[in-house]
Image (cartoon, grey):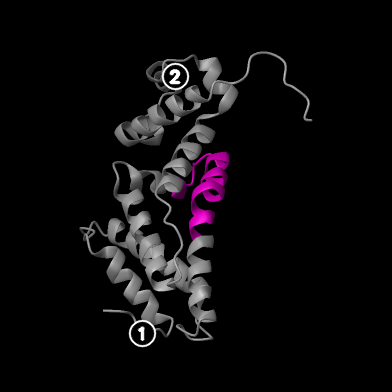
Amino acid sequence: MPPTQPGRPRDASIDGAILAAAGRHLATHGYEAMSLVAVAEEAGTTRQALYRRWPSKADLATATIAQLAAAGEPAATDDPFVDLLAELTAFHAGVIRPNGISMVGSMLQSGTDPDLADLYRSRVVSPRRRRLRRVLRRGVDADLLAADADVDTAVAACTGALYALALADDRIPRTWPSRTARFVWRACGGQAPT
């Protein structure tokens, strides 16, 4: 039996209230303007309770984004193309939400807090890239994609295409996930479903 922790048990409802408030603040104000004092106040708790759970703004922001990404994470099917499309649809929804692209932009600035960038990469970017890589490898293993498909470049193209449109200030079409899935699938030697 694990040792018991001294004091009262942690109230899980506070965790949810803080993450929900942080999500609203990120969407409304972006990372730079997000205030932990305001998040704690909106969540109906104290700064101390917030800091016990997430010791920094970077920790809270990336935990919030990771939770949002996990909530939209699609369930795997037996069809790698369907799974690729689902991953790109979830990614699209996450990035186009209010201030979604600004969080990505914050990661690219030279003055970005290294802890923030590391947490964002490990909690948000790396899991998505692993899932995309796994989907494409399944396509290769099932002989739906070329045996020599450049899966690493294809993974970068999956997300990079949306960032390129955003940087060019082009409108990101509603059809972006399906168009990108077909493009990447064909680039890997597959026959994209119509």
Tell me the amino acid under the disc marked 1.
Gln
Tell me the amino acid under the disc marked 2.
Ala
Residue placed at 41% from the left, 20% from the top?
Answer: 43
Q: Residues within 10 Å of mark 2 (few under 14, many from 20)?
A: many
- Viewer-nearest residue: 154 or 7: 7
In the picture as drawn, the residue positioned furthest to the front comes out as 1
Residue placed at 46% from the left, 35% from the top?
Answer: 61
Residue placed at 28% from the left, 61% from the top?
Answer: 165
Quarter in which the N terminus is drawn: top right
Range shown magenta: 107-129
Decide: marks 1, 2 in contact (CB < 8 A)?
no
- In the image, residue 116 lies in the stretch drawn in magenta: yes
Q: Position of residue 123 (x, y in %)?
A: 53, 47
- In the image, residue 131 lies in the stretch drawn in magenta: no
- Viewer-nearest residue: 112 or 53: 53
The residue that label 2 is drawn on is: 40
Residue placed at 51% from the left, 45% from the top?
Answer: 120
Q: Position of residue 46 (x, y in %)?
A: 49, 14
Relative to 122, 69 lies left or right: left
Q: Is residue 27 above or below residue 108?
A: above
Q: Residues within 10 Å of mark 1 (few under 14, many from 20)?
A: some
User: Can you tell which quarter of the image residue 92 is in?
Assistant: bottom left
Q: Position of residue 191 (x, y in %)?
A: 36, 84
Check residue 191 in the rendering and tell me which mark sits there, or answer none. 1
The kind of secondary structure the magenta stretch mainly shows is: helix
